[in-house]
Amino acid sequence: MRWQENVTLLMQIRKLARGLWILPVVLTLATGCGSTGAKPGSGETVPPYKKKHTVVYEITGRGKVDIAYQSDKGKVEKSKMSLPWRKKVIVKGDDPLTLSGVIPGFEAPSEPFTCTIERDGKQVAKKSDHLSVSCFWSDADA
């Protein structure tokens, strides 16, 4: 009977892990939109400067992973890819950047997998774990 409880628990963890990748994406959209670009206390409205930035998203490790990241058009792109995985995009402005990966299945791999975000050649986020990883960067972190 004990093994059935373990299988049920593993199934619940798997469902939870599959849903975790969306949390950073939702937080990014909820906190990163709507800036006027005005300096605090300046009293004037300054349109946001849309400088282009080169962003490299990367997840290293082995196996397959469900990936979600912010594309060059600001949309969230989702796919299932084999690791290692790397994607280069050009983004405009200082919108927050998010990369998430979830290992599908019941068992975590024996070694962790790692997500990183580079912005204009500088590593701005890195995280390692066994079931899911989420990297996040915003200009408030800079």
Image (cartoon, helix red, strand yellow):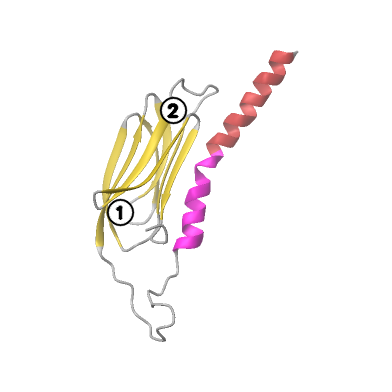
Neighbor class of circle 2 (other Cα within 10 Å; few <14, some 14-19, many 20+) is: some
- The number of numbered badges drawn on the structure is 2
Mark 1 is on which residue type?
Asp
Q: Is residue 104 left or right of residue 137?
A: right
**Residue at the right extreme?**
1
Disc 2 and disc 1: Cα gap in Å?
28 Å
Q: Is residue 50 magenta?
A: no
Depth order, front residue of 126/64: 126
Q: Which residues are magenta?
A: 19-32
Assign the magenta stretch its main secondary structure. helix
Residue 99 place in picture, x, y as percent = 40, 45
Residue 117 place in picture, x, y as percent = 34, 45
Residue 42 place in picture, x, y as percent = 40, 84
Task: Give the SS element for disc 1.
Answer: loop
Earlier along the polypeptide chain: callout 2 or callout 1? 1
At 39% across and 34% down in the image, what residue appears?
A: 114
Quadrant of the rendering where the N terminus is positioned:
top right
Residue 5 place in picture, x, y as percent = 71, 20
Q: Is residue 21 magenta?
A: yes
At 70% across and 16% down in the image, what residue appears?
A: 4
Q: Is residue 8 left or right of residue 105?
A: right
At 29% across and 38% down in the image, what residue appears?
A: 86
Neighbor class of circle 1 (other Cα within 10 Å; few <14, some 14-19, many 20+) is: some
Report which residue position mark 2 lands on. 112
Report which residue position mark 1 lands on. 72
Mark 2 is on which residue type?
Pro
Task: Give the SS element for disc 2.
Answer: loop
